[in-house]
Amino acid sequence: MGGDFGPRVTVAASSDALKRHPQLQILLVGQSDAIRNHLRRCRGKHLQRLEIVHADDVVAMNEKPSLALRNRRESSMWKSLELVAQGRAQACISAGNTGALMAMSRLVLGMLPGIERPAIVAAIPTLKGHSYMLDLGANIDSSAQQLLQFAIMGSVMVSAIDRRDRPLVGLLNVGSEDNKGTGCVREASRLIQGHGGLNFIGYLEGDDLFSGRADLVVCDGFVGNIALKSCEGLSKLLVRKVQGSFRRNPYRRLVALLATPILRELKRQLDPGRRNGATLLGLKGVVVKSHGGANRTYFGYAIDQALEEARLNVPALIADRVAVEVARCRSDGVDDVASHSKN
Amino acid sequence: MGGDFGPRVTVAASSDALKRHPQLQILLVGQSDAIRNHLRRCRGKHLQRLEIVHADDVVAMNEKPSLALRNRRESSMWKSLELVAQGRAQACISAGNTGALMAMSRLVLGMLPGIERPAIVAAIPTLKGHSYMLDLGANIDSSAQQLLQFAIMGSVMVSAIDRRDRPLVGLLNVGSEDNKGTGCVREASRLIQGHGGLNFIGYLEGDDLFSGRADLVVCDGFVGNIALKSCEGLSKLLVRKVQGSFRRNPYRRLVALLATPILRELKRQLDPGRRNGATLLGLKGVVVKSHGGANRTYFGYAIDQALEEARLNVPALIADRVAVEVARCRSDGVDDVASHSKN
């Protein structure tokens, strides 16, 4: 029911996804009248694999997460997460209120043992293809221990999704020298460095984010959110500048016409919608957040992302890895990954 | 002597600047042999307004600021700042080690009364032209009180340089609602909001950085540095993608040929070198940092920036404004802007 377009986009994208994936089944959770209304425009046998689960209530996009948590237990968001908790669904996809989705996911699904906080991870484009970055805003600030947990969770996910053996992990900082950054970042560097299971390449500066040097970039949610949104803002500025530049006079408009396929391709590459689908990692279940403004095609990418993570069972992979490490740490007599060490 | 190219760029750019500005005089501080060597390539009467001040030593680009501060008192950097402190020069321009320049500036020039820490401010491109942003990395973390001081200093500078009466001030955050962000950011918002002399428009998210909604964007140096460098990284990625896109086949290479003036213009607009020259605000003197990789033309922009700030005497304008406010706060019986209130 969420996002800027509600069931108009989510219903159509679900129908497309069922066509793409012959084994997929979808439960559409929300106000059944509205859903049925949009389903009328879809046709085909694939719709037999689609089921409506009615939910009376909807979480508003600007609702305070704490209030949604208290008052919206009959909402489509809450009910979708319950379906995952009950094992009736293997993943939840939402284009709704991110804060509410986070808060409800923690309560309904719960955190994996050994993980303190969820983190939002998403793919970013690089010179070499793509990398992943977390946390993109699930948390306002994170301890060094939590940054280590993000590195572990992200590594497991990148290994599974991209079939990479030991993904390269970088830590976002304001310089590459050891003495740079906050105490928390330096401590996180020490923890990640000292962790046998992670392939740590050290600090990354902002301008290395898109170089592809790291397969996984770790940072706290405040910095990650601002850095990525700043880049979105820059992309918008550039698209406008390119459009303006190619429209200034008749000669330029002619060149623009000749360059149409190139410009269209560039616009597509620039479009963050292509990488739609951010994962809430650390939960006992797959939860994928679509951008609120995603269209039918882009919402489909979020569905595909969730499907892939459910197929691989990423939460179980993370739980296994953390369990092994907790056991190893305990036998070594050192603090385990679940221990709190705020600084 | 600093930067990636040393006197090769700084000497040539100085000669150009003397031609542009008939009233300008330049003191070139550094190893006189090296400087003279590069001066040999320049000709003209304007060179009479150029003087060499010999300095034996040079601060290395990767030297730890604390060590430079202790060991490099005979360096070109230290001596340049001394010339400003003595009133022999009205501004210092360096392409060298940023951390060392900061540390030496604080010691040699000193901070303005009422300002705890310097901040790095620079222009960023926007849909409407340009805005300014600070702090871009002078500090690793900043208290709410320091963020308020950044807002005051930045406002004074934007007012003077862009001749704007009450520049619009935004505070960078992960959301626009009151309850978003760290305690420090929320407290800074309260302080800036409550400050009669500032035209505060509230929180800005990353994607608003380049919209031009604010004339001045305030943030701590950790976030500011990473956000801006991330955008530089994205720019590099995009230039590479555009180049690749226009080279893929003979038809595209032909279109690229026709589009040459447009692509050249876009590349120039994308180039961060055009906005070269970041100011260290809060000091008792004008100090401008050029990008280490700046070429002759771009280093010239940093000289022009310093010249303009010296002409307007930005440090005195800031000192005046802060003095008025300290007096007002004291008569009101509230904490003055210089008081420490870390949180």
Image: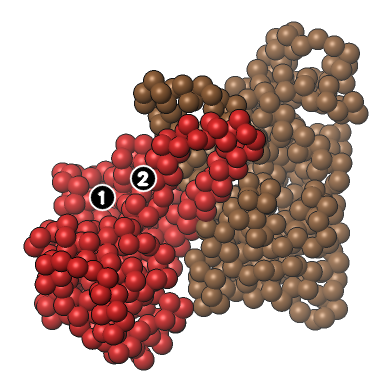
Chain colours: A brown, B red
Q: Earlier in the sequence, mark 2 or mark 1?
A: 2
- Determine whether A142 is above or below B116 in the image: above
Q: Which residue is at a point 84% across and 16% down the rendered structure image? A: A47
Q: Chain of mark 2?
A: B
Which residue is labeled 1 in the image?
B194
User: SS of the residue at dot 2?
Assistant: strand
Give x and y (percent) for residue A294.
61, 29
Residue type at numbered disc 2: Pro
Tell me the residue at 86%/33% (across/down): A88
Within-10-Å neighbours for mark 1: few <14, some 14–19, many 20+: few
Residue A28 placed where, x, y %?
76, 23
Name the amino acid type tagged 1. Answer: Gly
Residue B205: in sight, yes or no? no
Q: Chain of mark 1?
A: B
Question: Is residue A182 toward the left or the right of residue A59 in the image?
Answer: left
Query: From the viewer's perspective, is residue B150 above or below residue A104?
Result: below
Q: Picture coordinates of residue B243 (x, y %)? A: 56, 43
Residue lying furthest left: B23
Residue drawn at the location 16% of the way across and 77% of the way down: B51
Residue of label 2: B125
Q: Secondary structure at mark 1?
A: loop
> Is residue A297 shown above or below B182?
above
